[in-house]
Amino acid sequence: MKDLRLCIMGFGAVGQGLAKVVLLKKENIKELYGVELKIVSVADSSTSAISTDGLDEEELIRVKKETGKLANYPEYGSNISGLDVLDECEYDVLLEATPTNIVDAEPARSLTLKAFEQGKDVVTSNKGHLALNFNELLDAALKNNVIFKFEASVGGTMPIINLAQETLPANNVESIVGILNGTTNYILSRMTSEGTSYENTLKESQQLGIAETDPTQDVEGIDAACKTVILANSVLGIPAKYDDVKVKGISDITSEAIYLADKEGYLIKLIAEVSKDNLEVSPRLVKKGSAFDINGTLNMATVTTDLSGKVTVRGIGAGSVETAAAMLTDLIHIIREKYKV
Amino acid sequence: MDKLDGDSMKMNLVLELSDTPGQLVNSLEPFRELGANLVSVIHDRTDKNENGKIPVQITVEGERQNLEKIIETLENNGISILKVDGSIRTIKISTILIGHIIDTDVRDTVDKLNDLDDVTVVAMEVKFNNEEKSSGLITVEMPFGLKNTVLNKIKEIANSKDLLVINEI
Ligand SMILES: NC(=O)c1ccc[n+]([C@@H]2O[C@H](COP(=O)([O-])OP(=O)(O)OC[C@H]3O[C@@H](n4cnc5c(N)ncnc54)[C@H](OP(=O)(O)O)[C@@H]3O)[C@@H](O)[C@H]2O)c1
């Protein structure tokens, strides 16, 4: 039986979700692929837990939840952090779930490049480094002959990158049009069903923990624009940069506009459009009852192809275990490719 | 549609297809499925429309019901039908504008759209909230082929008046 040693960087919602899905699925993976998953190092912003024998998934979550720091993990907790964690302990795959940073892409960019140089495969849920440094990262992965997977960065658990790359490779993808931000979709759905103003609905979403205290990234379309850049590069082969996307958020949408749209059989949705002719995130009118008519925090995307016509997916766009599940799928892809016995 | 014997009719269509392989074959699928006979198909790849698409003239014979179904299926498949039996097909699109719609001369906004050939603003409704910003819904009717021209015009007007445009997908 072969061990597959995992290093998890970032132990928030997604990182802890990873510990859960590894615990839930490792027996299954052992049976199917003959590979034993072992979490050997885990880091948060300033501390870590490291053991070559493998860490206990439930204990990791308990320590982080109860004490806030992985340094408190019995026996194996330490103050080693950041890039040093990658040197401290041999691992095979980096699972990177640090915060998205669209200013300088750190710490994700440095962590990922270092892992590549060490010859390690990387799975990420992060958007910042992909939106800012897509080519640099893909070139580095290629140069070091490692696999780099990032399904979770767009649409959370909803398959979209793998769908286009792995399931529809006979096709040329002409465009992807979709709803790629759950928070704004929730706000717009509530404004529609309750007739409430943008400001009040945003407040309600913040109280429910759906919108963040600083909602800018979501409501101004920045998050969806990052995903637009990732899809443009990875699926359509367009060497797009963040600045190439026309971005307009939802903060100017009025309840009157939603009312007028409703009367004519339309909904207002924050739509990301990815095509050679147009990279755009903006509020758009969509027909009620169409594929774009989804409520709450769901995501969806319609992929238009040359041979298969339109293929539409919808699914859960965020969440701890859900996002981690997309990362585990990417990890299994790596196992099938490199480790299956 | 010309009446033939029984319930069978002849119909002339002008479709618009993009210049990619398989487009013509795909577009003809509904005709076969609904048991209509193609009388003629004129497809000249060197004769492109302004938008780079190719007009295709089709004459087809079949039962009235099926011919209507074909038009519906083609449109559902996202194929533009420019003409049916010589008359231009029109579509309506709705757009929402948010901002100082009244202060930026709503009449002028409507006139600028009506000034485009064959384009008519058929409805306009404006709603106010407590602040001075208003929200308006404009419905415009135009020949199928002019959709992009109209959408671009609306964007241009909105930009110049600092209005937020919410166009259809
Ligand atoms: N949550 C979702 O549903 C979702 C969905 C799709 C994609 N994503 C992406 O997944 C990533 C993680 O999201 P999340 O929701 O799990 O965020 P989160 O709950 O804020 O967790 C971030 C984690 O990263 C740690 N961290 C911060 N700086 C670090 C550094 N320099 N080195 C190592 N760890 C560091 C934090 O440490 P502390 O615990 O010490 O603060 C925390 O444990 C983000 O890039 C996000 O955009 C999230």
Image (cartoon, coloured by chain):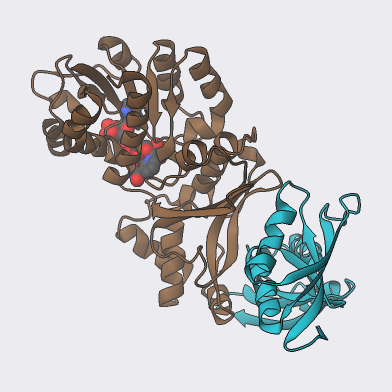
Chain colours: A brown, B cyan
Along the line of sight, the residue nearer the viewer: A214 or A269: A269
For the N terminus of chain A, which image quadrant?
A: top left
Residue at 57%, 67% in the rendered image:
A286
Along the line of sight, the residue nearer the viewer: A240 or B1: B1
Farthest residue, direction front: B5
Judge from the rendering whether residue B10 lies leftward or rightward of residue A340; answer left or right: right
Q: Position of residue A38 (x, y in %)?
A: 20, 23
Along the line of sight, the residue nearer the viewer: A47 or A116: A116
- Image quarter for ligand 1: top left
Farthest residue, direction bottom: B6
Q: Specify the quadrant of the image occupied by residue B1.
A: bottom right
Looking at the picture, does residue B87 appear above or below residue A327?
below
**Is residue A196 visible to the viewer in this orientation of the structure?**
no
Along the line of sight, the residue nearer the viewer: B70 or A204: B70
Residue at 37%, 30% in the rendered image:
A333
Farthest residue, direction left: A74
Looking at the picture, does residue B13 appear above or below residue A138?
below
Q: Where is residue A119 in the image (x, y as percent from the top left)?
A: 40, 12
**Is residue B124 visible to the viewer in this orientation of the structure?**
yes
Q: Where is residue B105 in the image (x, y as percent from the top left)?
A: 79, 75
The count of marks equals 0
Q: Position of residue A147 (x, y in %)?
A: 43, 22
Looking at the picture, does residue A12 appear above or below residue A200?
above
